Amino acid sequence: MLATTLFLLVALLAAALPVAAALGSLGLLLDKLYSSMPLSLALGEVAWSSSKDFLLVAIPMFILLGEILLRAGVAERMYGAMVKWLSWLPGGLMHSNIGACAVFAATSGSSVATAATVGTVALPLVRKHGYNERLFLGTLAAGGTLGILIPPSINMIVYAVLTDTSIPKLYLAGILPGLGLAGLFMALVVVLCLLRPAWGGRKLTPTWHERLHSLKDLLPPLGIFLVVVGSIYAGLATPTEAASLGVVAALILAASYGRLNLAMMKEVLENTMRTTAMVMLIIVAAYFLNFVISAIGLTTMLTDFIVGLGLSKLQMLVAVVIFYLILGCFMETLSMMITTIPIVAPVMIGLGFDPIWFGIVLIVLVEMALITPPVGLNLFVVQSLRSRGTLNDVIIGSTPFVAVMVLLIVMLTAFPGIALWLPSLAG
């Protein structure tokens, strides 16, 4: 049964079906093959129960927030400030890419939106300043992954819903690993550019007056972050309400920049509805698949198989890392989380892993899937912004950053306090 399920899933994804269609079709096929009763009759109930959770309202709110910020001119101003503060490092503007991604991640909650926004501003500068294009592309694709690790994060909300985990504590747990990962990315760029100075392009030399003057362009994203995350920790708003407050703040910001008009809002709302529909369809299809595999006994079979291996905690963690590295090459991140967390998380938590800590490790593993071929979304996003070259350029440039993410998981395993210290302070 397990082998058949894996074969059908790979076959459906290889057929280039949309992810939601592939997951839903797999559920219907397994229903016909292995169920003694028509499980498809429960599809309506599954669709309703999987989409009525109040927390899920935060997803379209964060998508809307990112769309508004994308068109409000925040990215251009923020990137310009990062250039003035970070371009002196070996690697120049590549550090600005990572820094801008980290700052924008603190407002958008989406990796794809982060990569697209910063990439749109940064890519025209590649040849102008003589950078190694592949590494430059890699910093954009990898930097974009910070969107789901640095709070607020849509993927953390999904993990919290599936595991009944505290979103505020997950958000706190993601801050230090997110900033640490950005720092490791920048350290990698420094090392590579010291070894190959020609990769680092021509250095810019902004004055201290220009740097201090640019600080005002970093205040808007910081303000959005404080409105969204600060309102949660101050006890003033739930995550869903905080996302709505962020949207209001972003609208005020867009108006102050003179970007708020009917044409802009039409585009913002259309893109928000399109993205939300895609996300919710994946959620419904994945929930239906989970319902089917639980009903036919596949979940119990797989769990018993994993437990029966008799692996130690560390061996099980290594197995989970390898599992997600392989799975991330074939599945979109959100569907991967929804289909695997109900199976993997109970096993790992049952072995004694802290659910908050494991959530952060899982998010890092999901981040890897965003930049591993052949279906890494950020790879396609960055390539789509170019007017030349092939996807291989982005893949080659992103590969060293996958190794850095593995290093972060090793550090989180050796020093769990990196993720758990801030949540412990919150009590």
Image (cartoon, helix red, strand yellow):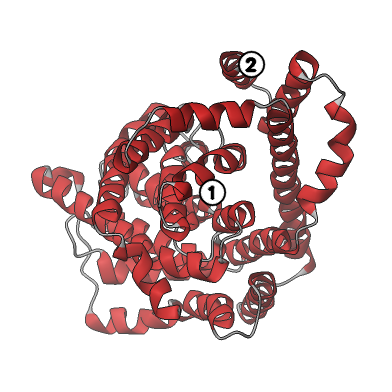
In percent of width and height, residue 424 lies at 39, 74
- Relative to the observer, which residue lies in front, 390 or 240? 240
In the figure, 205 relative to 185: above or below? Answer: below
Q: Is residue 382 above or below residue 252?
A: above
Q: Which mark is residue 168?
A: none
- The residue that disc 2 covers is 8
Q: Quadrant of residue 290?
A: top right
For label 2, the SS is helix
**Secondary element type, mark 1:** helix
Q: Position of residue 42 (x, y in %)?
A: 87, 35
Residue 384 appears in view: yes
Quarter of the image with the N terminus is top right
Q: Up-down: is 383 above or below 89?
A: above
Q: Residues within 10 Å of mark 1 (few under 14, many from 20)?
A: many
Residue occupying the point 63% across, 85% down: 236
- Residue 213 falls in which quadrant of the image? bottom left
The number of discs equals 2
Q: Residue at x 30, y 80 (%)?
A: 210
Report the amino acid beneath label 1.
Answer: Val
Q: With respect to residue 149, does 365 lie above or below?
A: above
Q: Earlier in the sequence, mark 1 or mark 2?
A: 2
Q: Residue furthest left?
A: 195
Residue under the image location 67 percent in, 27 percent down: 297
The residue identified by callout 1 is: 112
Q: Quadrant of the C terminus?
A: bottom left
Q: Quadrant of residue 64?
A: bottom right
- What is the distance, in whole Å, between disc 1 and disc 2 at their CAs? 28 Å
| Residue in the foreground of this view, choosing between 302 and 318 | 302
The residue lying toward the viewer, choosing from 254 and 172, is: 172
